[in-house]
């Protein structure tokens, strides 16, 4: 009965729960654009609007939310873990900074990089299942499958039965390469932009909602641009089925064949949709995260004040 009050009273508990709220806000706000991005990356042509119009006309608008259960079910823990690891390591990498001061930009970048690499262990299987579901209609046409996959559990069971743990973690290496450096840049860009928009807010914590939205949106856009070619390769590797004749045999082969067959522009196909989604999603993530932190800290302070008042009586 006392677990949650004690957990939320600690710094670990606050960062963990606030990160979870941020992740949920991000998934719900940006999932339709993510579905369009995946379809663009795995096709040979088509603007975002054309893909959107075709999907809505042939499969219905709800198809843009197909596969959302997998990331939504895991996003609370995954995002909470990322923010908690980042908050801890950003100070561990630069112990000369007093606890009353915000972590240095070096600590922010290094903490974000390690957090991104660690979270790949969770996000890689989740994104594999999500991509398989998002591309389900097209895959079924190619393989002449009459029945659709029912959901993330069904997809996971089939992949594990056919390929084992190796199939579940297909694309892990490219996910680590994508997420490690991009998360370092992500957290650094947020902290730097926030301070430029609202000088002194990193120390006093008085940034406005507008500052959170803009800084979070720009951080998301910059980090995605930095890793987008890697994400295209990851999508193509995770979209194919290893149980049949795979088109690509590894990261380098996917890079080479994709550029040889479709040109260098293939590595940036869908980047406009992604940057727009990244701005929206990460603005929502950081605003929800910072707001949740404020609520948790204020609630803890109020509880502490009430306890002191009762003791004084």
Image (cartoon, grey):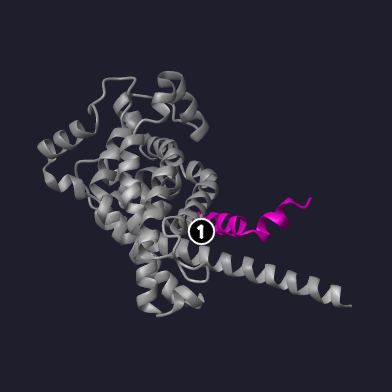
Q: Quadrant of residue 142?
A: top left
User: Dominant secondary structure of the magenta stretch?
Assistant: helix
Residue 16, how many percent across, how many down?
Answer: 57, 54
Residue at 45% from the left image edge and 66% from the top image edge: 97
Residue at 38% from the left image edge and 39% from the top image edge: 131
Per the image, the residue denoted by label 1 is 22
Q: Is residue 81 left or right of residue 190?
A: right
Q: Quadrant of residue 220?
A: bottom left
Q: Is residue 62 left or right of residue 184?
A: right
Residue at 41% from the left image edge and 41% from the top image edge: 120
Task: Please name whichever residue, 113 or 211, is drawn nearer the observer in this view of the structure.
Answer: 113
Based on the picture, tell me whether residue 17 belongs to the magenta stretch. yes
- Which quadrant: the C terminus? bottom right
Q: Where 287 falls versus 133 (above or below)?
A: below
Task: Please name whichever residue, 15 or 105, is drawn nearer the observer in this view of the structure.
Answer: 105
Task: Please name whichever residue, 145 or 267, is drawn nearer the observer in this view of the structure.
Answer: 267
Say if residue 209 shows up in the picture: no
- Where does the magenta region start and end? 1-24
Helix, strand or loop for disc 1: helix
């Amino acid at each position: 009965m006392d677990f949650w009050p004690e957990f939320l009273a600690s710094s670990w508990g606050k960062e963990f729960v606030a990160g979870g709220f941020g992740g949920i806000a991000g998934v719900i706000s940006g999932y339709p654009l993510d579905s369009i991005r995946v379809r663009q990356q795995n096709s040979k042509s088509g603007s975002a609007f054309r893909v959107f119009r075709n999907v809505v006309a042939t499969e219905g608008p709800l198809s843009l939310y197909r596969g959302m259960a997998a990331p939504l079910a895991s996003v609370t823990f995954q995002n909470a873990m990322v923010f908690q690891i980042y908050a801890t390591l950003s100070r561990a990498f630069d112990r000369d900074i007093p606890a009353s001061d915000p972590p240095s930009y070096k600590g922010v970048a290094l903490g974000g990089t390690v957090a991104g690499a660690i979270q790949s262990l969770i996000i890689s299987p989740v994104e594999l299942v999500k991509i398989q579901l998002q591309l389900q209609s097209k895959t079924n046409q190619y393989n002449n499958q009459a029945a659709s996959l029912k959901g993330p559990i069904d997809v996971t069971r089939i992949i594990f039965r056919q390929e084992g743990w190796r199939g579940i973690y297909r694309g892990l290496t490219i996910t680590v390469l994508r997420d490690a450096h991009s998360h370092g840049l992500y957290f650094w860009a947020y902290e730097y932009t926030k301070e430029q928009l609202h000088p002194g807010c990193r120390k006093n914590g008085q940034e406005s909602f507008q500052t959170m939205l803009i800084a979070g949106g720009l951080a998301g856009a910059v980090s995605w641009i930095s890793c987008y070619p890697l994400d295209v390769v990851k999508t193509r590797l995770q979209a194919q089925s290893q149980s049949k004749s795979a088109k690509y045999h590894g990261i380098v082969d996917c890079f080479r064949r994709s550029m040889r067959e479709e040109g260098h522009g293939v590595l940036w196909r869908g980047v406009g949709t992604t940057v727009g989604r990244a701005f929206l999603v990460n603005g929502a993530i950081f605003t929800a995260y910072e707001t949740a932190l404020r609520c948790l800290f204020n609630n803890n302070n109020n509880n502490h004040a009430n306890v002191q008042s009762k003791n004084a009586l």
